[in-house]
Image: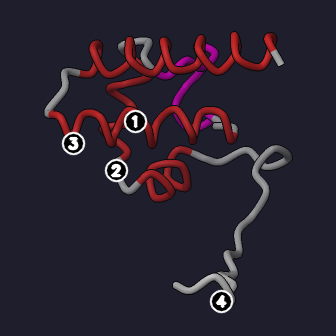
Amino acid sequence: MTRNEIEIISGVLLDEVALTLEEFAHACSVSSEWVSLHVEAGILSLPEIEPARWRFSSRDLWRARQLCALERDFDALPDLAALVIDLREEIISLRNRAS
């Protein structure tokens, strides 16, 4: 892409939308089972309600996509991937406070 070309990306702002389990799994390109295992392990946190009532936010989506990438690209264990994501979130928080 040259400097004069513009890439247009379309998407949906998810701050106001809560995704169901199936929608969330599809958005992350993972199975519903993958999501369920990570929720049950506490890696993705949700209120303790039945899976049919689970709703995921844009923050959950960001976290799950990062987890999936770390697990896939580095063959990381879920707990290790979660620790890396926690550290990334802390770094982002600290940088935002410093600015």
**Residue highlighted by disc 2:** 30
SS class, disc 3: helix
Vertical relation: 17 (above or below) 90 = below
Circle 4 is placed at which residue position? 5
Q: Residue at (70%, 17%) from the top-left corner?
A: 95
Q: Which percent across, then down, holds residue 18?
A: 73, 44
- Find the distance from the CA under tag 3 to the CA under tag 1: 14 Å
Q: Tell me whether circle 1 and circle 2 mark residues in contact (CB < 8 Å).
A: yes
Q: Can you tell which mark lies on residue 72?
A: 3
How crowded pointer 2 is (Cα within 10 Å; few <14, some 14-19, many 20+) is rated as some
Q: Nearer the viewer, mark 4 or mark 3?
A: 4
Q: Earlier in the sequence, mark 3 or mark 1?
A: 1
User: What is the total number of numbered labels drawn onto the structure image?
Assistant: 4
Q: How is the image coloured?
A: secondary structure
Q: Mark 1 or mark 2: which comes first in sequence?
A: 2
Q: Residue at x 38, y 17 (%)?
A: 84
The span shown in magenta is: 44-54
Of the two numbered discs 2 and 4 in the rendering, the one whose residue sits closer to the viewer: 4
Q: Nearer the viewer, mark 1 or mark 4?
A: 4
Query: Disc 2 to disc 4, how far (Cα)?
Result: 33 Å
Circle 1 is placed at which residue position? Answer: 35
What kind of residue is marked 2? Val
Q: Earlier in the sequence, mark 3 or mark 2?
A: 2
